[in-house]
């Protein structure tokens, strides 16, 4: 059984075709020279990737099974155990290994404020995990978020974010995020250093997604909670919270655990006070 669901092909304009072609060539360049650290994680064996409770809940798929593992932490915010600790550990090591390789081999794009390492093979791999998760989660999303997933989600964008203590000499160098060429600028632009605390934070925003799946990969850290402040459209991002305390929820990340929320559920990440936190994010979208 293939875990990776084929996505329906939407019609593409010329710009998209060029971008996809560039992406392919870029990926090919990396594939031909990157040496994998943990070859075994690329096989995406479900029993090694997902915890038994998640696998049990998705086979067979039923609303009742899904709901059995879901915790509604706050209105519209759901959490559940998803990834195996060993898998998280190896994936994180692979990310770091790939980042080092990308740095050493100059796969680095410097922007005015950040250095973003474009690790496309890794990105491609994230996508596979995401698609695998998406295959499992699609039904779940339509059950939990019928208002945005009613007609199905047909596109996704997966990436890894990392935060840690700001390294004194060069905050720019510290920022490391994995993005594909298409998403070079998102959401890296949203990151900034907090000058007071000298820690990397992610400012308050909405995602460019209908629904976001965010799974913590680890490792050891304190702080770095996600704070949610109610659902708004992008135009009303800054409108005041009207329904306290219902709109006010802080989520402490737990390695291996996933949190699901609407993209328009406003959120940000607090500063990490110790250690490094990395998360695998999937933005699920509907192509209009
Ligand atoms: O740091 C996190 O867990 C959230 C990241 C996030 O919100 C984003 O990438 O859009
Ligand atoms: Fe976000």
Image (cartoon, rainbow, N blue to C red):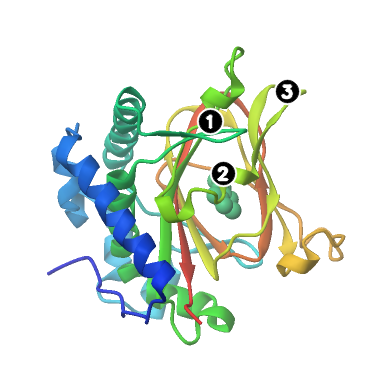
Camera-side residue of 100 and 16: 16
Q: Are marks 1 and 2 in contact (CB under 8 Å)?
A: yes
- Horizontal side of residue 3 vs 85, given as left or right: left
User: Where in the figure is residue 90, as x and y percent of width and height?
Assistant: 27, 35
Q: Are marks 3 and 2 in contact (CB under 8 Å)?
A: no
Residue at the disc numbered 1: 175
Q: CA distance from mark 3 to mark 2?
A: 19 Å
Residue at the disc numbered 2: 188
Q: Which mark is residue 197?
A: 3
The residue located at (84%, 65%) in the rendering is: 243
On screen, 53 above or below 26? below
Element assignment for label 1: loop
The residue located at (20%, 65%) in the rendering is: 3
Marks 1 and 3, the one that precedes in the sequence: 1
User: Where in the figure is residue 121, as x and y percent of width and height?
Assistant: 27, 46
- Determine crowd level at label 1: few under 14, some 14-19, many 20+ residues with C-alpha closer than 10 A: many
Q: In this rendering, does residue 211 appear at all? A: yes
The residue located at (17%, 32%) in the rendering is: 35
Q: Which mark is residue 100?
A: none
């Amino acid at each position: 059984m293939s875990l990776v669901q084929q996505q329906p092909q939407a019609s593409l304009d010329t710009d998209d075709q060029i971008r996809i072609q560039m992406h392919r060539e870029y990926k090919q360049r990396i594939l031909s020279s990157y040496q994998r650290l943990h070859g075994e994680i690329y096989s995406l064996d479900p029993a090694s990737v997902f915890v038994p409770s998640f696998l049990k809940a998705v086979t067979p798929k039923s609303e009742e099974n899904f709901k059995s593992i879901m915790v509604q932490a706050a209105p519209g915010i759901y959490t559940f155990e998803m990834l195996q600790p060993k898998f998280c550990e190896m994936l994180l090591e692979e990310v770091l290994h790939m980042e080092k390789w990308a740095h050493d081999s100059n796969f680095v794009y410097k922007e005015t404020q950040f250095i973003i390492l474009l690790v496309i093979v890794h990105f491609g791999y994230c996508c596979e995990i995401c698609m695998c998760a998406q295959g499992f989660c699609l039904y779940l999303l339509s059950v939990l978020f019928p208002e945005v997933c009613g007609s199905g989600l047909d596109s996704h964008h997966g990436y890894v974010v990392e935060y840690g203590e700001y390294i004194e000499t060069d905050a720019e160098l510290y920022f490391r995020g994995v993005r594909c060429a298409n998403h070079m600028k998102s959401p890296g632009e949203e990151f900034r250093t907090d000058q007071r605390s000298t820690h990397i934070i992610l400012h308050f925003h909405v995602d460019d997604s209908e629904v976001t799946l965010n799974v913590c990969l680890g490792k050891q850290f304190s702080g770095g909670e996600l704070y949610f402040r109610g659902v708004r459209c992008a135009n009303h991002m800054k409108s005041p919270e009207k329904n306290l305390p219902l709109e006010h929820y802080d989520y402490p990340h737990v390695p291996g655990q996933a949190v699901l929320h609407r993209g328009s559920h406003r959120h940000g990440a607090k500063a990490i006070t110790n250690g490094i936190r990395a998360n695998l994010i999937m933005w699920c979208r509907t192509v209009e």
